[in-house]
Image (spheres, rainbow, N blue to C red):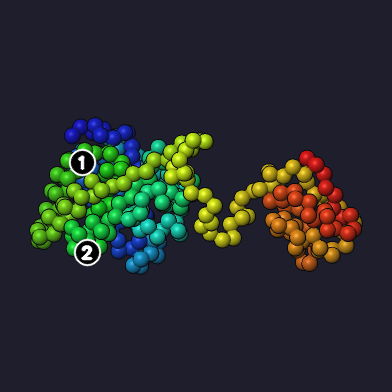
Amino acid sequence: MERGNMMKKLTEIRWHGRGGQGAKTASLLLADVAFSTGLYIQGFPEYGPERMGAPITAYNRLSNEPIRVHSNIYEPDYVVVVDETLLDSVDVTAGLKPEGGIVINSAKDPAELRAKLKGYTGKVYTIDAKKISIECIGRNMPNTPMLAAAVKASGFMDEKLFLENMEASFKHKFASKPEVIAGNMKALEVSLKEVKENLMKDIHEKSAYADLTPGGDIYGSGNSHFFNTGEWRTATPVFVPENCKQCLLCVPVCPDSAIPVVDGKRGDFDYDHCKGCGICFKVCPFKAITFNKD
């Protein structure tokens, strides 16, 4: 195959998994099969705590030209998540390009998982890698199905060529265990057919309810300080410190905790979060708060 026939100049892939699931092995296999087709490649892991089950990250760069970059990948074209539980603890879509996609090991429909992807608008793919590996290989080895799913989603090489090169790689890798080759090849073939895809749909006034994105769900606690809601304000309370007796009656009635208290004394308003409801103005008996329309 001529370099670049199936891909753009550079494709970057980031893998998220847990120790023992084979994410690193999958990234190295992907690099190996890409290299065998004449592409320039990189495949390398990044470890956190070196223990079974700990989150790990691995990377691939695939190009039809020499690769001069040697850093981690911060803005990948594609992300592959080998363990669905990482969606709750790792920002897997960080830097992910919207024109790319994310592949997740899950039995769920891609649309069900989109709500956990922090507003990511690109393509979402799922594949039940556990089910496929148990049926084809005899045990839970998700890296083989996820490898095929990554090729399917990214489209960086022809699927038939991928299978031919993977079979050659398996024959070399499992030269002393030829009985495992058939199961791994079957897992790859099944996976290429069973990848599910979900595209972000345009929402408008005539959209069916089934097309609407999920809303109203809370996926973490204590996160309100991340959202600057002060821009909603149409009126602004103003603190008049010379009139304040530090009775603190205003503090517990503030629905947004926008009145900071330090060493038993209130300070000026936190205008990043104050919505201008005016409750504090109403309860203050000493005219220490004025209320001005914006």
Q: Quadrant of residue 284?
A: bottom right
In this view, the residue in front, 45 or 101, is: 101
- Asked whether the viewer can see residue 63, the reply is yes
Which residue type carries mark 2? Answer: Arg
Name the residue at 85% across, 49% down. Answer: 290
Name the residue at 33% across, 39% down. Answer: 11
Count of numbered tags: 2
Q: Quadrant of residue 82?
A: bottom left
Quadrant where the C terminus is found in the figure: top right
Q: Position of residue 227 (x, y in %)?
A: 61, 50
- Asked whether the viewer can see residue 241, the reply is no
Q: Position of residue 116 (x, y in %)?
A: 46, 52
**SS at circle 2:** loop
Name the residue at 60% across, 52% down. Answer: 226
Other residues around mark 1 within 10 Å, as few (<14) / some (14–19) / many (≥20): some
Which residue type carries mark 1? Answer: Glu
Q: Position of residue 199 (x, y in %)?
A: 39, 40
**SS at circle 1:** helix
Q: Earlier in the sequence, mark 1 or mark 2?
A: 2
Q: Position of residue 191 (x, y in %)?
A: 23, 50
The reply, left or right, for residue 282 in relation to residue 23 is: right
Q: Does the residue at mark 1 contact the one at mark 2 (Cβ under 8 Å)?
A: no
| Residue on which disc 1 sits | 159
Question: Disc 1 and disc 2: Cα gap in Å?
Answer: 24 Å
In this view, the residue in front, 244 or 29, is: 244
Name the residue at 13% across, 48% down. Answer: 168
In this view, the residue in front, 131 or 69, is: 131
| Residue on which disc 2 sits | 139
The reply, left or right, for residue 100 in relation to residue 257 is: left
